[in-house]
């Protein structure tokens, strides 16, 4: 049933995919993959049931970074900022090297909570553990600094983003703003 669910999902038949994954769970209450897939399908639809499926996947595999990240992203998308941050913190507790958790925490702090110092801190952590030239993290840390009024720091981050990607238009516009050229 799980394989049928994947096949239906692959061809875009969400209704039969959900049905197959649910049948798989009825057959095996510890079917992590089916719980995760149901979470993803319900998450895509913006349905709160996604959280229940993610939680069930986590009962089967409590340290699953994959399920935690999917849950955190769902909570973030649903505007449940504090819950998303707690979920990302769980990931960081398992592996502090998971740069997407740091980045998403920074994003939540900046966009949803307007806490720019916390945002900058988390973007810094993402830069420290992420791939070299993590342009989006440099740009967003620059934006957090700019919004907080730390224009020198913002300028440095926009310049770093442009160093790694000279075509990064958002960083170029940010740099123009902090230099007063816009």
Image (cartoon, rainbow, N blue to C red):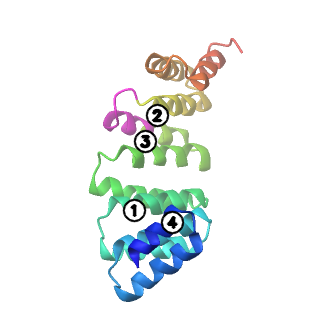
Q: Position of residue 139 (x, y in %)?
A: 52, 29
* Viewer-side label of 4, 3: 4
Q: Position of residue 32 (x, y in %)?
A: 35, 73
Marks 3/2: CA–CA distance: 9 Å
For marks 1 and 2 on the same chain, the one whose residue lies earlier in the sequence = 1
Mark 1 or mark 4: which comes first in sequence?
Answer: 4
Q: How many residues crowd around disc 2 within 10 Å: few (fewer than 14), some, or many (20 or more)? A: many
Residue 3: quadrant of the picture: bottom left
Q: Which residues are magenta?
A: 123-133
Whether the residues at callouts 2 and 4 have beta carbons within 8 Å, the answer is no
Question: What separation in Å lies between label 1 and label 4 (alpha carbons)?
Answer: 21 Å
Q: Which residue carries the number 3 mark?
A: 122
> In front here: 177 or 3?
3
Where is mark 1, residue-wise? 68
In this picture, is 40 found above or below 170?
below
Whether 103 is drawn above or below 76: the answer is above
Cβ atoms at labels 1 and 4 below 8 Å apart:
no
Query: What secondary structure is marked by label 4?
Result: helix
Circle number at residue 9: 4
The dominant secondary structure in magenta is helix
Q: Residue at x 49, y 17 (%)?
A: 159
At x 43%, y 38%, the residue is: 121
Residue at the spot 52% in from the left edge and 71% down from the top edge: 50
Closer to the observer: label 1 or label 4?
4
Spatial distance from mark 4 to mark 3, Cα to Cα? Answer: 35 Å
Question: Is 12 rendered above or below residue 95?
Answer: below
- Neighbor class of circle 4 (other Cα within 10 Å; few <14, some 14-19, many 20+) is some
């Amino acid at each position: 049933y799980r394989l049928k669910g994947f096949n239906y999902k692959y061809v875009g038949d969400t209704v039969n995919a959900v049905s197959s994954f649910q049948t798989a769970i009825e057959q095996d209450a510890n079917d992590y993959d089916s719980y995760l897939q149901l979470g993803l399908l319900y998450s895509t639809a913006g349905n709160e049931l996604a959280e229940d499926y993610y939680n069930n996947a986590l009962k089967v595999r409590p340290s699953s970074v994959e399920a935690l990240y999917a849950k955190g992203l769902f909570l973030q998308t649903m505007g449940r900022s504090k819950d998303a941050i707690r979920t990302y913190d769980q990931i960081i507790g398992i592996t502090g090297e998971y740069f997407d958790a740091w980045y998403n925490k920074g994003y939540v702090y900046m966009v949803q909570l307007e806490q720019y110092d916390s945002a900058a801190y988390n973007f810094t952590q993402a830069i420290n553990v992420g791939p070299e030239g993590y342009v989006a993290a440099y740009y967003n840390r620059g934006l957090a600094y700019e919004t907080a009024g730390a224009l020198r720091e913002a300028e440095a981050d926009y310049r770093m983003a442009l160093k790694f990607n000279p075509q990064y238009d958002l960083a170029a516009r940010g740099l123009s703003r902090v230099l007063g050229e816009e």
